[in-house]
Image (tube, rainbow, N blue to C red):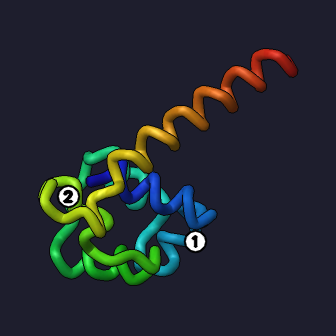
Amino acid sequence: MGERIRALRHLKGISQVDLGEALGVTFQQVQKYERGRNRLSINMFITVCKALGAHPMELIGSYFPDDPEHGSTDRLLEKLKEAEERIQQIRRIIG
């Protein structure tokens, strides 16, 4: 769940600080959610969805493979990981 929150946050260009402000928590708490150190209550889950402008199934859709409309977050995560690898390669080249 945390990886999906992080991927959607990155996709929308929202910082942890900004998301934390929208949720009424610190950016450290957002980090804990994203790393899976703290679990989300259902109320906080709904608040996260609203803050990210995401349908709840965008975050949990891949757990239900028969939902083709909202089950694309695994592909989003793969693309995010690929992009982060490319960024690291560029940083190594730039030095």
Image location (x, y in percent) of residue 34: 37, 51
Q: Is residue 32 left or right of residue 43?
A: right
Q: Nearer the viewer, residue 18 or 25?
A: 18
- Residue at image x 46%, y 53%? 7
Q: Position of residue 92 (x, y in %)?
A: 76, 17
- Out of 86 and 15, give the one closest to the viewer: 86
Label 1 SS: helix
Compared to residue 92, the image places residue 85 above or below, namely: below
> Where 18 falls versus 81 (above or below)?
below
Residue tagged 2: 39
Q: Nearer the viewer, residue 74 or 87?
A: 74
| Amino acid carrying mark 2 in the image | Arg
Which residue is rendered at x = 41% and y = 72% of the image? 25
**Residue 74 visible somewhere in the drawing:** yes
Decide if residue 86 is on the left or right side of residue 5.
Answer: right
Left or right placement of residue 56 versus residue 13 in this view: left
| Residue that badge 1 annotates | 18
**Who's the residue at 21% across and 81% down the image?**
43
Quarter of the figure that contains the C terminus = top right
